[in-house]
Structures are given as C-alpha cells and as structure tokens.
Amino acid sequence: MQRIRTGDTVEVIAGKDKGVRGQVIRVIPKTNRVVVERVNVLKKHQGAQQAGRNQIQPGIIEFEGPIDLSNVMLVCTQCDEAVRVGFRVSEEGQKVRVCRTCGKDID
C-alpha cells in the first residue's frame, strides 16, 4: 500500500517550492516520484508538429515536473498538518493509513 496516492493533498518539505501545498496529480512508484499541481513548474519550448491531420501549434508549454517522494509529506484531513503516515489493520481486515500525529484514519 502506498503512503501517498493520487488526489491527496501534500506539502513540499524540501527544494525550491518548500512550504507549498498542492494536490497529487500522478504517482510514479517505479522511480519513487510524484507530480503535484503548481509545484516544480517547468517550461518546454515546442516546435510545430504534424500529428496526422492535426497541426500542433508551436510555443512555450508550462507543465508540472515530477519531484522525489521523499520531498513531500501528506497533509492530514483532521489536524491540517504535514504528518508522517502509519498503517493499521481495521476490523474488516483492510489496511488503512493513519496520521502519526493525531491517530485518526486518513482514508
């Protein structure tokens, strides 16, 4: 089970965007990276391309680049703080994520 999933709110704890909160757009578990909205915004200069019948316009494209998973912390929904994530097994036998600060379930 992953500590951070798509749709979670996270806070950046290291790097040029330190302190910024955003929602997770994509998790890349193979490379241990995560894409967060409005964080690590990169610019790409793209030329004109022909894709079938459609013409792709040239210009400067801004997009969010991936950052390392160790540079973000999950924001707890109850205590509204960046917290470490723990796990426990519920009564139904399912593994759930738990806030290490307040002890409440995150899911």
Image (cartoon, helix red, strand yellow):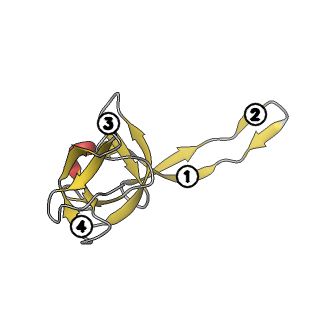
Give the Cα distance between marks 3 and 2.
42 Å
Q: Which mark is residue 61?
A: 1
Quadrant of the drawing holding the C terminus: bottom left
Q: Which residue is mark 2?
A: 50
Can you give x and y, in whole percent of width and height, for residue 78 in the image?
A: 29, 70
For disc 1, the neighbor class at 10 Å (few under 14, some 14 to 19, many from 20) is: few
Q: Is residue 16 left or right of residue 49?
A: left
Q: Are marks 3 and 4 in contact (CB under 8 Å)?
A: no
Q: Amino acid at mark 1?
A: Ile
Give the Cα distance between marks 2 and 1.
17 Å
Q: Which mark is residue 21?
A: none
Q: Which residue is mark 4?
A: 19
For disc 3, the neighbor class at 10 Å (few under 14, some 14 to 19, many from 20) is: few
In the image as oriented, which residue stretches furthest toward the right? 53
Query: Which quadrant of the figure has residue 36?
Result: bottom left
Q: Are marks 2 and 1 in contact (CB under 8 Å)?
A: no
Q: Secondary structure at mark 4?
A: loop
Q: Amino acid at mark 2?
A: Gln
What residue is rendered at 69% in x and 41% in y?
48
Query: Which quadrant of the figure has residue 19?
Result: bottom left
For disc 2, the neighbor class at 10 Å (few under 14, some 14 to 19, many from 20) is: few
Can you give x and y, in whole percent of width and height, for residue 9 in the image?
A: 36, 60
- The answer to which of marks 2 and 4 sits earlier in the sequence is 4
- The answer to which of marks 1 and 4 sits earlier in the sequence is 4
